[in-house]
Image (cartoon, rainbow, N blue to C red):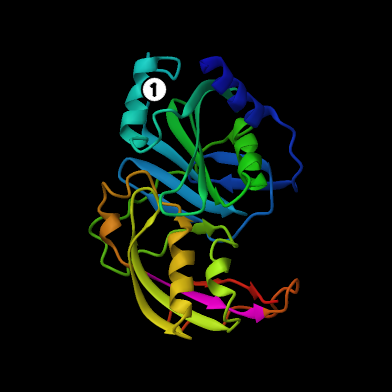
């Protein structure tokens, strides 16, 4: 059975992919990824006391890259099951115990990769996760790719996983400053990047065919899921349910120490704008200014019949 799991993992990492050739460079981490799909704006850099982590959406997938400041002790390596178990105990406590794991080649160095896919609780979506550890220049790197989808695994997810196996490591950009975690005042931290399945709320919202605006307040847990959502405004009122559905089905990219730093206690706001267009016709224009200044906006086009 273990051999079958590893075969599935090998097929994911080695299957041919068709995507636009885009490069993504993280100078803070000394990382360069090539041959990625179309990039998405909205990267966030989290500089912690012991590590740096960059999180960025790539299409419908979200990528996190973490570099530990402290050098890996001499004699420790990813081929050691005890060392791997310590990493999973520290970073991946919530990962399914049946997740597929195998030694892989990452940028010419030995790596350890875990694959997991399962249906989200109280959601029609499946969550796909790929976590890869590699040691480069005596520093531990952790790459995590995640995506949610109602049907098949997103092509962007596979493309990013493939790019990680061909990563190039470069010199870092130099000394850095740390930023506060739990001491950050509410509202001081920007909303982390997020992705979602665009069809996840259609069955709720297509009946009224009305253009709407919804404002929501919420927290984000250590797995990037929304907690304690509160409706602040909805016009028409019926769109409040639609906004809550889309929010609950979004996946936020948060650093590995999100809960340890107390950031899961912060409250964020988000505005959904629901323009309407005829069936098969894309919505025109861009997002309107948010009702609450500086609130991030997610624009979801509703196609009527």
Residue lying furthest left:
183
Q: Circle 1 sits in a helix, a strand or a loop, which is it?
A: helix
Q: Quadrant of residue 50?
A: top left
Dot 1 alpha-carbon crowd within 10 angstroms: few under 14, some 14 to 19, many 20 or more: some
The location of residue 294, given as percent across then percent down, is 43, 77
Please tell me which residue lies in front, 67 or 182. Answer: 182
* Residues rendered magenta in the picture: 269-276
Residue 295 visible (yes or no): no
Q: Is residue 17 left or right of residue 196?
A: right
Which residue occupies 39% across, 29% down?
Answer: 97
Residue named by callout 1 = 84
SS assignment for the magenta stretch, majority:
strand
Using the image, determine if residue 185 lies above or below residue 39: below
Using the image, determine if residue 17 lies above or below residue 126: above
The location of residue 143, given as percent across then percent down, is 50, 37
The magenta stretch spans residue 152: no
Which residue occupies 52% across, 16% down?
Answer: 1
Which residue occupies 50% across, 26% down?
Answer: 100
Which residue occupies 67% across, 41% down?
Answer: 34
């Amino acid at each position: 059975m273990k051999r079958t799991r590893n075969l599935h993992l090998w097929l994911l990492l080695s299957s041919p992919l068709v995507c636009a050739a885009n490069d993504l460079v993280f100078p803070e981490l000394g990382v360069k990824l090539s041959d990625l799909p179309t990039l998405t704006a909205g990267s966030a850099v989290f500089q912690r006391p012991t590590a740096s982590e960059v999180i960025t959406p790539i299409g419908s997938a979200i990528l996190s890259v973490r570099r530990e400041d402290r050098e890996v002790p001499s004699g420790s390596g990813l081929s050691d099951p005890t060392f791997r178990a310590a990493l999973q105990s520290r970073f991946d406590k919530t990962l399914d115990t049946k997740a597929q794991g195998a030694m892989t080649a990452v940028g010419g160095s030995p790596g350890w990769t875990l694959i997991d896919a399962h249906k989200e609780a109280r959601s029609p979506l499946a969550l796909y996760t790929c976590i890869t550890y590699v040691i480069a220049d005596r520093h531990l790197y952790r790459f995590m790719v995640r995506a949610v989808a109602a049907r098949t695994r997103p092509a962007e997810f596979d493309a990013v996983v493939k790019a990680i196996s061909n990563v190039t490591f470069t010199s870092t950009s130099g000394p850095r400053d740390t930023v506060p975690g739990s001491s950050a005042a509410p509202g001081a931290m920007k909303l982390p990047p997020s992705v979602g399945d665009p069809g996840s709320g259609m069955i709720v919202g297509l009946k009224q065919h009305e253009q709407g605006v919804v404002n929501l307040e919420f927290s984000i847990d250590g797995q990037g899921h929304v907690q304690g959502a509160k409706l602040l405004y909805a016009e028409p009122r019926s769109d409040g349910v639609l906004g809550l559905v889309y929010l609950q089905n979004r996946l936020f990219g948060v650093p590995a120490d999100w809960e340890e730093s107390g950031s899961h206690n912060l409250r964020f706001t988000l505005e959904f704008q629901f323009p309407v267009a005829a069936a098969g016709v894309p919505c025109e224009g861009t997002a309107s200014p948010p009702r609450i200044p500086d609130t991030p906006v997610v624009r979801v086009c509703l196609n009527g019949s």
